Image (spheres, grey):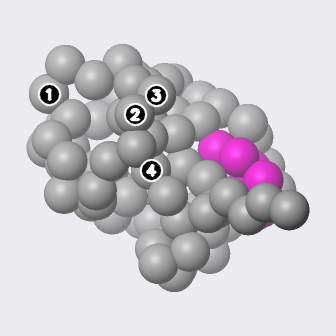
Amino acid sequence: MQVLYFAWMRERIGVPKEEVETNAATVADLVEELRGREERYALAFSDMAAVRVAVDQELVEIDTPLTGVREVAFFPPMTGG
């Protein structure tokens, strides 16, 4: 699946997107897999309260299943003005 990173997530990880082979059942499982990759991922996913998730371009909760999913995006909460 395609995994996208935005704003400071992209800066900490160092890439805007990547193709990820995973057996993760949920978004939370995917986050745990990514955290275990390298320190830069661990740092980016250290505070999930500061991260929002979209699955196939729809905002979801961390326990959302990944069955049939093509894209997961991680980004900080949006603020406006």
Residue 17 on image: x %, y %: 65, 32
- CA–CA distance in space, label 3 to label 2: 4 Å
Residue 17 is left or right of residue 61, and the answer is right
Q: Amino acid at mark 2?
A: Glu
Tell me if residue 72 comes above or below residue 36 in the rendering. Answer: above
Instruction: Quickly name the residue at label 2.
Output: 58
Highlighted magenta segment, given as a residue range: 5-10
Residue 28 on image: x %, y %: 27, 59
- CA–CA distance in space, label 3 to label 1: 15 Å
Count every numbered label the image shows and give the total.
4
Instruction: Quickly name the residue at label 1.
Output: 67
* Front-lying residue, 9 or 42: 9
Instruction: Quickly name the residue at label 4.
Output: 53
Residue 61 is left or right of residue 18, and the answer is left
- CA–CA distance in space, label 1 to label 2: 15 Å
| Marks 2 and 4, the one that precedes in the sequence | 4
Q: Dot 3, crowdedness within 10 Å: few (<14), some or many (≥20)?
A: few
Q: Secondary structure at mark 3?
A: loop
Q: Dot 2, crowdedness within 10 Å: few (<14), some or many (≥20)?
A: few
Residue 74 on image: x %, y %: 54, 49
Tell me if residue 13 comes above or below residue 56 in the rendering. Answer: below
Residue 79 is left or right of residue 59, and the answer is right
Q: Secondary structure at mark 1?
A: loop
Question: Are circles 3 and 2 on residues that touch, CB within 8 Å?
Answer: yes
Residue 42 on image: x %, y %: 54, 72
Q: Amino acid at mark 1?
A: Thr
| Marks 1 and 4, the one that precedes in the sequence | 4
Q: Amino acid at mark 3?
A: Gln
What label does residue 57 carry, if any? 3
Q: Is residue 30 visible to the viewer in this orientation of the structure?
A: yes
Mark toward the viewer: 1 or 4: 4
Q: Secondary structure at mark 4?
A: strand
